[in-house]
Image: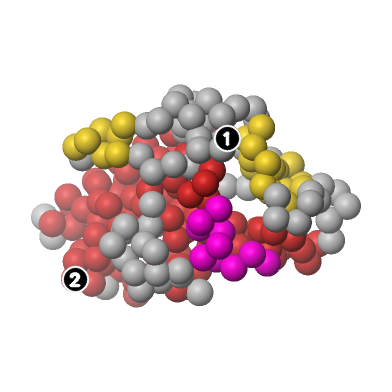
Amino acid sequence: MKFTKIDSSLPRGLVDAAWGKFEELLLELGVRDDNTHVGTGLGGNNFQLYSLLGVKHSLMKLHKGIIVTHDDGIYWDAETLAFMPRLDMRKKVDTIIPLVEERYPGAFLFSKEFGDATKINYLKLVSREMQGALLNAQVLCSGLAKELDAGDTSNILMTAKLLEVMPFEIVLLAVRKFIGIERLVKFSLDEHSRLGPILHRINKIVDT
């Protein structure tokens, strides 16, 4: 995921720092909700991640500490995003996107409004572009999982080539959900020449 709009007056270094923190936030939200060993230790929140994936994000020069929501997405203050402690940022996200309830696996009950972001239509949860990426990643990883269980490792390279052009937060979700840690270890996927670097970059960002 990239920022849809970046204020041209922002220094390059500040933009890079803000993007780094934004990527860390997305990837942390993508880990298991009971994974307290990475990042802030709060665990992931896939519902909030899906919500963030579904709206546009702009990096702006606003008043420090301000994150503004609009009809067309979220405007992030660059300094706030770059320098706010990660724990405080997670708390801020909680005020923007309320907790949602999973009634049964795969069926989410969403509020129609964000906590303090009532102008964003919650029904437009995931953009068409992200829907396609999510679906493709899920199909690839679930297919590879079935092949691995059958002892077939011939499609690891092809899967890696397709995954490496997708947003890392989506790859994280799909790999974690459909391939799982057991297969990663059993087939030494983190040592694969093409898939390994993808997994290592994700782990590096999540563990930062």
Coordinates of residue 106 in the picture (x, y in percent) = 25, 37
Q: Residue at x 44, y 26 (%)?
A: 112
- In this picture, which residue range is highlighted in magenta? 83-92
| Magenta residue check for 41 | no
Pick the residue in front: 178 or 147. Answer: 178
Pick the residue in front: 6 or 101. Answer: 101
Res 165 visible: no
- Position of 151 with respect to 129 (left or right) is left
Coordinates of residue 116 in the picture (x, y in percent) = 56, 37
Which SS class for mark 1?
Answer: loop
Question: What crowding class fits label 2: few (fewer than 14 Cα within 10 Å), some (14-19), or many (20 or more)?
Answer: few
Res 77 visible: yes
Placement of 150 over or under 131, stated as above or below: below
Q: Which of the two marks, 1 or 2, is nearer to us in this view? A: 1
Q: Residue at x 19, y 37 (%)?
A: 104
The amino acid pointed to by label 2 is: Lys
Residue 183, by quadrant, is bottom left
Indicate which disc, 1 or 2, sits on the residue closer to the N terminus.
1
Question: Pointer 2: what residue?
Answer: 186
Which SS class for mark 2?
Answer: helix
Q: Residue at x 51, y 56 (%)?
A: 91
Q: Residue at x 27, y 52 (%)?
A: 177
Query: Residue 179 bears which disc, if any?
Result: none
Query: Residue 117 bears which disc, if any?
Result: 1
